[in-house]
Amino acid sequence: MAQLIAANWKMYKTMAEATATATALAERLQGRIPSHREVLVCPVFVHLAALAPILRDAGIALGAQDVYPADEGAFTGEVSPKQLQDVGCTHVLVGHSERRHILGEADALIAAKTRVALERGLAVVLCIGETLTERRSLQLEAVLFRQVSSALTDLPAAVTERLIVAYEPVWAIGTGEVATLEDIDAAHGLVRRMLRDCLGASAAAVRILYGGSVKPDNAGAILQLDTVDGVLVGGASLDAESFARIVLA
Ligand code: PGA
């Protein structure tokens, strides 16, 4: 199973900056992506179509940061799975902690997004993770279980081959605070067990990424953990050189 090295550009960059970063990344990675790695970049919606050809030529996949769980309709401001695929997306992030905590997305909406996007053929990176308060009050397992089971229960086995889970402790996102290797290993072990409970045998094919202050200097050690199948990178993915170093770590 190839490791997935994913960039989440969040709400950063103008079109000119996004194009320049994608071009620089494509130049650095052209023909150099290790065979055991896959690379994904998730820019804002309005840059997707422009970046698609630049990334595709370098073998880098394109993903959106969100999706609406319907094919079309009166959903002002939203974007459907088909519209994402139409401009070259193969992946989409769902349930990122900033959407859960800043935009107030609830488990039921995240479950609908996960299911519909998978059914329409997108690979979904389902993001989960606990806040510092939840961790300190010993709710890590309960929170992860709620997030995993609400999104994945009753998913048809045929679509789980496109499912990816990103464990991102909220307290480690954008804070420079990285979870220890022991914390990451333990949480990934829990998530793997929950995936088996929800999905049965098909859980084995689901990759579990770590996210939260991944940088060029800590990516190598994190990616060496047996329980880690890739990383989801925010801040350190905004610079082509820094993200390329993570891909090659
Ligand atoms: P960070 O963000 O790498 O800046 O901590 C990770 C994420 O939000 O996916």
Image: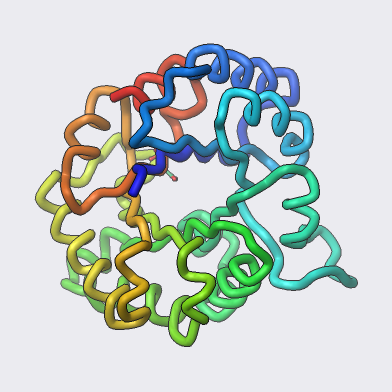
Quadrant in which residue 193 is drawn: bottom left
Residue drawn at x 20%, y 61% is 187
Quarter in which the C terminus is drawn: top left
The x and y percentages for residue 110 are 55, 71
Q: Position of residue 82 (x, y in %)?
A: 77, 59
- Residue under the image location 72 percent in, 28 percent down: 53
| Residue 120 spot, x, y in % from top left | 68, 67
Which residue occupies the foreground of this view, 46 or 164?
164
Using residue 230 as the reference point, say whether residue 179 is left or right of it: left
Residue located at (31% from left, 51% from top): 171
Quadrant assignment, res 56:
top right
Is residue 48 toward the left or the right of residue 75 in the image? left
Total residue callouts: 0
Residue that extends furthest to the left in the rendered view of this protein = 182
Foreground pick, 174 / 189: 189
Q: Is residue 176 left or right of residue 57?
A: left
Nearest the eye: 93 or 175: 93
Q: Residue furthest bottom?
A: 154
Furthest residue toward right: 74
Q: Is residue 249 above or below residue 221?
A: above
